[in-house]
């Protein structure tokens, strides 16, 4: 039995982060410009608090100007929109991210569309979605998670995915749909599957590249995977396990790592795979936004 390569997203993200820090220092020296990232978090969702803390830490380690706006759960939509308006006009800020999910009374679409497309480092604005789906990526911002997945896929299979079939499990706006666009742009033959797909296992089994982004712990099993496939696990699920009679909570992906490792060519672990890459792609997008703001190449 072969064992798949365990793709080390943490190491790749650390390497990329060093390069971003060096480019940031050069930008300061040559242009007197420091990339600025504003992260807005509304409410107390514990997972979001952890993600936002990690984003802030990483921004600081890259040498960015980093601000965090923590708003209470009951903040009104008008107050959120006013803050975004101020950030859109603030020259020190090049990237704005509003952490999702939002409390129920806030309109996610209105809020994400109020961010200037030039500061939309999440790539959620319709202008950036349109640029990505039409293949005009020169100055588009691509959502961070699929962008990070794509780099890991290219490390394994090269930049041109001609002749390879890719199956994306999940059709979210944050991951599934932009992931499909990116794979298509690199010439993969792409299938997007979801909860209504018939014979999901059979469809996944055809794929040379599998991207799992559904939020169901350990759903993709080894017998769903074609031998030699590259498997990218976007899921972050918290599950309870019992070790020596003690109940513990642990993070697990959408992919059953052990059984998939026995058949795949390469697979990302959770944690330590896609997660760190998502954060570093946010830094890459913010540096890019800063460079584009002064007319440099992104
Ligand atoms: N919540 C989970 N993933 C993301 C993301 O990529 N961006 C934002 N803004 N919120 C998220």
Image (cartoon, rainbow, N blue to C red):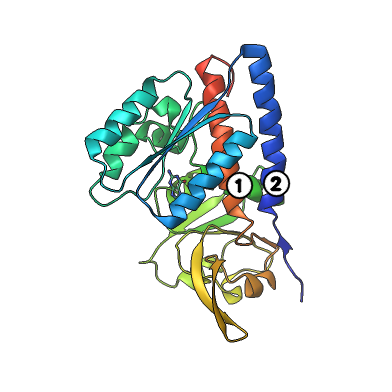
First in residue order: circle 2 vs circle 1? 2
Percent position of residue 12, x then y: 70, 46
Circles 2 and 1: CB distance less than 8 Å? Answer: yes
Instruction: Say which of 166 and 282 sits in front.
Output: 282
The disc at residue 277 is 1
Q: Which residue is mark 2?
A: 12
Splitting the image into 4 quarters, where does residue 282 fall? top right
Q: Against 210, is 9 above or below?
A: above
Disc 2 is placed on an element classified as helix
Residue 182 pos. (x, y %): 52, 43
Residue located 59% across and 76% down the image? 223
Q: Position of residue 99 (x, y in %)?
A: 41, 44
Answer few, some or many: residues within 10 Å of disc 1's Cα (few below 14, many 20 plus, some between 14 and 19).
many
Q: Is residue 189 left or right of residue 267?
A: left
Q: Can residue 79 be seen by looking at this rendering? A: yes
The verdict on label 1 being within 8 Å of ligand 1 is no
* The C terminus lies in quadrant: top right
Quarter placement of the N terminus: bottom right
Q: What percent of the width, then of the height, locates residue 136?
A: 48, 30
- Where is 55 relative to 45, above or below? above
Report crowding for label 2: few under 14, some 14 to 19, many 20 or more residues within 10 A (C-alpha).
Answer: some
Q: Residue at x 67, y 31 (%)?
A: 21
Image height of 190 relative to 38, above or below: below
Residue 45 located left or right of residue 206: left
Image position of 245 with respect to 207: above or below? below
Left or right of 29 in this view: 74: left
Residue 147 in sight? no
């Amino acid at each position: 039995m072969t064992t798949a390569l365990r793709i080390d997203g943490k190491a790749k993200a650390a390497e990329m982060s060093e390069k971003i820090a060096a480019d940031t220092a050069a930008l300061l020296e040559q242009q007197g410009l420091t990339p600025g990232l504003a992260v807005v978090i509304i409410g107390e969702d514990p997972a979001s608090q952890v993600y936002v803390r990690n984003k802030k830490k990483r921004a600081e380690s890259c040498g960015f100007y980093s601000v965090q706006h923590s708003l209470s759960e009951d903040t009104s939509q008008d107050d959120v929109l006013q803050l975004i308006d101020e950030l859109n006009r603030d020259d020190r800020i090049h990237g704005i991210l509003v952490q999702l999910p939002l409390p129920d009374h806030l309109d996610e679409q209105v809020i994400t569309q109020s961010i200037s497309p030039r500061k939309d480092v999440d790539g959620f604005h319709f202008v950036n979605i349109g640029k990505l789906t039409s293949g005009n990526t020169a100055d588009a911002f691509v959502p961070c998670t699929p962008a990070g997945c794509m780099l890991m896929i290219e490390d394994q299979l090269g930049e041109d995915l001609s002749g390879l079939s890719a199956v994306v499990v999940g059709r979210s706006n944050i991951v599934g749909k932009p992931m499909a666009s990116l794979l298509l742009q690199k010439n993969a033959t792409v299938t997007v599957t979801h909860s209504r797909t018939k014979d999901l296992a059979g469809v996944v089994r055809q794929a040379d590249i599998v991207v799992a982004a559904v939020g169901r712990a350990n759903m993709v099993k080894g017998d769903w995977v074609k031998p030699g496939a590259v498997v990218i696990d976007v899921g972050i699920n918290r599950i309870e396990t019992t070790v020596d009679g003690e109940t513990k909570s642990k993070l697990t992906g959408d992919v059953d790592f052990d059984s998939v490792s026995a058949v795949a060519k390469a697979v990302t672990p959770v944690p330590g795979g896609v997660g760190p890459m998502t954060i570093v792609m946010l830094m890459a997008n913010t540096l890019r936004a800063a460079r584009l703001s002064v007319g440099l190449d992104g």
